[in-house]
Image: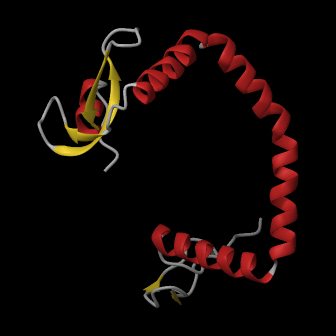
Amino acid sequence: MKTINWNFKLKNCIICNNIFKPTNGKQITCCKECEEKRKLNYNKKYNKNNPEIVAKSVREHYQRNKKKKCEYQIKYNQNHKDVIKLRNDTREYIRKNKINFVGLCLDCGRLCKREIHHITPTIQGFILICQDCHYKRHNKRSRR
């Protein structure tokens, strides 16, 4: 029976130059962060040196997924007709009444860019509040 020697020599990380013991013979970075940096650098160099290949790949990907995207969009529109109509009607109402999105938030009172929050599913059943308050009302974490 053949035994495998897993004792790899110490190596220097190609990103941060730290000395590390690899877990396999092909490992060239010391940690996940360095591996991500290496991949990012490689992708940037590859994209810069091969713009025609990258553009062709992007076009092919778009063509392959165009049909799926259209099918998904049609299905979404059929299932959410009332939401889409409410959104469009609200935009029209705001445009006609010249409502300004920059102003005081009705929840916290900050002067900022505001978002629409629907209280009732009607055209006039909305308030304008800041992004943080909007996320709080929907029990979501802030994007910041």
Left or right of 103, for residue 63: right
Residue in the image at 23% along x and 46% along y: 112
Residue in the image at 46% along x and 91% along y: 17
Vertical placement of 79 versus 74: above or below? above
Residue in the image at 32% along x and 37% along y: 100
Vertical placement of 91 versus 62: above or below? above
* Rendered location of residue 121, percent (x, y): 40, 9
* Rendered location of residue 18, percent (x, y): 43, 88
Looking at this rendering, what residue extends furthest in the left direction? Answer: 109
> Where on the picture, by quarter, is residue 54?
bottom right
Left or right of 5, for residue 110: left
* Rendered location of residue 37, percent (x, y): 53, 75
Q: How is the image coloured?
A: secondary structure
Vertical placement of 129 versus 23: above or below? above
Q: Nearer the viewer, residue 35 or 122?
A: 122
Vertical placement of 36 versus 73: above or below? below
> Where on the picture, by quarter, is residue 72?
top right
Numbered-mark total:
0
Q: Nearer the viewer, residue 40 or 133?
A: 133
Left or right of 96, for residue 85: right
> Where on the picture, by quarter, is residue 28?
bottom right
* Rendered location of residue 12, percent (x, y): 51, 90
Residue in the image at 50% along x and 21% along y: 87
Quarter of the figure that contains the N terminus:
bottom right
Left or right of 143, for residue 105: left
Q: Nearer the viewer, residue 123 or 64?
A: 123
